[in-house]
Amino acid sequence: MKELKFALKRVAPVLISYLFVGLASGLLMKDAGYSAFWAFLSAVFVYAGSMQIVMVPLLAAHTPLLTLAVTALFINGRHIFYGIGFIDEFAPVREKSRLKHLYMALTLTDETYSVLCSLDCPEELDKNKAEFFVLASAHILWIISCTAGAFIGDMIPFDTTGIEFSATVFFVCIVVDQWKRFPSKLPAVTGALCAALTLASFGRDGFLIPALSAALIILILLKDRLSLEKLKEAAVHE
């Protein structure tokens, strides 16, 4: 299928990153005493690299599920903003299949959101299908890599000290890629300034949602300027 081939080419860098971060998550689960089955379930239903790494010590400390759920909401609250940006984009999918639409909304992550934002789909392809394959392939590989990490931990003993830093490296690579890919640096600078200011105001445990909210409001106010810059860039390439 053409849409699947196109999607796999675009999401390939993310898949490579998912492989290593997923393995790290599975290894941490195993190191905490959880079997590959639990690593599999966490990958299917939690599907959040940073949260899956954070929740390992919380699970080991017998943290109540309600506390885990609230923590997950705060850590991954930014995904709400991703979904808002794709309400109109995914509308045709919802008309055909509510279940598929729900799956696409729930599997938007930092990395797949980045891929979809820069997805220049040829006219002869169904863009919604390509978007679905991007999301599904990333989720499937995440499940496989998390489960494989736990199995590897069963067979070979690993010292997992510092392995959680792989998630940080992952995000740094994405930021660098976005900086190189897009001509306007205004969104990146806006995000960095909002993060720095809210970090100083709310601390590292409470800055993320305020930072995203502030960045979203500022970028909405600057959308006309960003659109103009995009048109100028397109004119230069022509």
Image: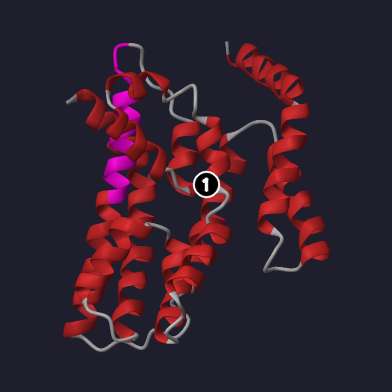
Q: State the quadrant of the N terminus.
A: top left
Q: Residue at x 83, y 63 (%)?
A: 201
Report the span colored magenta: 124-139
Tell me the element at label 1: helix
- Tally of marks: 1
- Picture quadrant where residue 21 is located: bottom left
Label 1 environment density (alpha carbons within 10 Å; few <14, some 14–19, many ≥20): some
Query: Could you tell me the amino acid type at mark 1?
Result: His
Please identify the quarter of the rendering in which residue 42 is found. Answer: bottom left
Q: Position of residue 210 (x, y in %)?
A: 72, 52
The structure's colour scheme is secondary structure
Q: Which image quarter: residue 147?
A: bottom left
The residue positioned 76% from the left and 62% from the top of the image is: 199
Say if the magenta span includes residue 10. no
Residue 230 image position (x, y, % from top left): 65, 20
Dot 1 corresponds to which residue? 79
Q: Nearer the viewer, residue 215 or 3?
A: 215
Q: Residue 159 appears at what percent x and percent y? A: 36, 88
Answer left or right for 150 relative to 115.
left
Left or right, residue 185 beside residue 59 = right
Residue at x-position 25% and y-position 89%: 157
Is 89 rendered above or below residue 78?
Answer: above
Please identify the quadrant where the C terminus is shown.
top right
Magenta residues, dominant SS class: helix
Q: Is residue 130 magenta?
A: yes
In the image, is residue 23 above or below residue 230?
Answer: below
Name the residue at 36% across, 17% down: 122
Question: Vertically, is 70 above or below 77?
Answer: below
Q: Position of residue 19 (x, y in %)?
A: 31, 60
